[in-house]
Image (cartoon, rainbow, N blue to C red):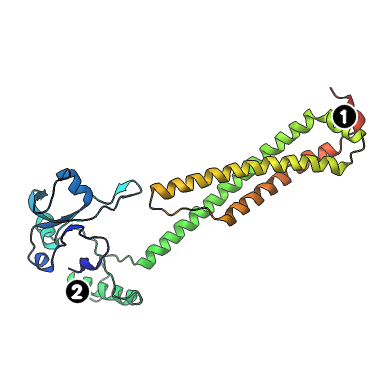
């Protein structure tokens, strides 16, 4: 009867199942928006009869449209009294019960009372262990946090590997650039360019290449984040600090992996460089 206090169900059209109907095991049902649309194709489903496991149930209410989560519709369901369910499927079916305390601070007390009530209902002796399980909201949050932590570690590893591969690619590109521009570098050194000038030029090109790639990646990530937020109930956003951190990291990668090509360019002998074809 206390299911009326839960926000999972509502009645946009019609009404909810009353405590009297629950106690008397009436064959009435509250159906989801998707179920009503599929069975009645836009017609008024109230006071109509549908069959559940071969038994006729009268539709007394329709829940409002909730959409979908992770590809699963939240509008395909039928709520019936517990007694009616036991008449259809037997009293020994596996059930999941939801208990909600009047005050969040009483969650531990509500959990203890729920355990006592279930032990009494199952006629368990004091020495016998529980033959049921209790999953509290705190336990669910702990599981969620553990899953998030595991995913975060995995993502850090993937990002680190991606940065390593990207850095190696940048280093190879800059080595090829230095090789192709050997005569240009030799000419600059012959005209008075110092080693730090050559290194600054190559490092600037390396950092620019890395940062441009990082900005493109950040833009794609922001686009995917927007798509996820618009198509799923999962909240997703891009923080400004993460954008700044991404740019700084990509610049550092370009600087680190561009150091060796820059040093090689700076160490070129101008005479030998000018002789190269």
Q: Is residue 128 above or below residue 57?
A: below
Using residue 162 as the reference point, say whether residue 111 is left or right of it. left
The circle drawn on residue 80 is none
Distance in Å between CA atoms under marks 2 and 1: 91 Å
Q: Which of the pair 138/208 is nearer the observer?
A: 208
Q: Nearer the viewer, mark 2 or mark 1?
A: 1
Q: Residue at x 13, y 49 (%)?
A: 44
Residue 156 location in percent, x, y?
A: 56, 51
Q: Residue at x 18, y 48 (%)?
A: 36
| Location of the N terminus (image quadrant) | bottom left
Q: Is residue 178 above or below residue 84?
A: above
Q: Which of the pair 66/125 is nearer the observer?
A: 66
Residue 176 location in percent, x, y?
A: 74, 31
Residue 265 location in percent, x, y?
A: 82, 36
Q: Which of the pair 161/208 is nearer the observer?
A: 208
The residue under label 2 is: 120
How many residues crowd mark 2 within 10 Å: few (<14), some (14–19), many (20+)?
Answer: few
- Label 2 element class: helix
Q: How many marks?
A: 2
Using residue 202 as the reference point, say whether residue 124 is left or right of it. left
Residue 233 location in percent, x, y?
A: 38, 52
**Residue 98, quarter of picture:** bottom left
- Label 1 element class: helix
Q: Residue at x 63, y 41 (%)?
A: 213
| Location of the C terminus (image quadrant) | top right
The earlier-in-sequence mark between 2 and 1 is: 2
The residue under label 1 is: 273
């Amino acid at each position: 009867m206390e299911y009326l206090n839960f926000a999972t169900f509502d009645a946009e059209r019609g009404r909810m199942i009353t405590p009297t109907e629950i106690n008397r095991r009436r064959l009435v049902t509250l159906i989801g928006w998707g179920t009503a649309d599929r069975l009645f194709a836009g017609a008024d489903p109230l006071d109509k009869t549908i069959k559940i496991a071969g038994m006729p149930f009268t539709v007394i209410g329709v829940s409002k449209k909730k959409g979908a989560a992770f590809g699963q519709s939240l509008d395909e369901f039928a709520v019936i009294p517990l007694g009616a369910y036991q008449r259809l499927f037997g009293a020994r079916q596996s059930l999941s019960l939801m208990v909600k305390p009047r005050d969040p601070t009483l969650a531990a007390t509500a959990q203890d009372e729920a355990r006592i009530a279930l032990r009494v209902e199952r006629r368990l002796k004091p020495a016998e262990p529980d033959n049921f399980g209790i999953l509290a909201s705190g336990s669910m949050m702990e599981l969620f946090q553990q899953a998030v932590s595991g995913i975060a570690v995995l993502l850090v590893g993937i990002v680190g590997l991606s940065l390593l591969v990207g850095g190696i690619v940048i280093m190879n590109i800059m080595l090829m650039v230095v090789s192709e521009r050997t005569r240009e570098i030799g000419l600059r050194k012959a005209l008075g360019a110092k080693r730090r000038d050559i290194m600054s030029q190559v490092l600037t090109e390396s950092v620019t290449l890395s940062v441009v790639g990082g900005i493109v990646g950040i833009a794609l990530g922001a686009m995917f984040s927007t798509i996820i937020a618009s198509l799923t109930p999962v909240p997703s956003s891009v923080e400004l600090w993460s954008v700044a951190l991404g740019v700084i990291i990509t610049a550092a990668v370009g600087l680190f992996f561009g150091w060796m090509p820059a040093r090689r360019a700076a160490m070129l002998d101008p005479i030998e460089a000018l002789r190269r074809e």
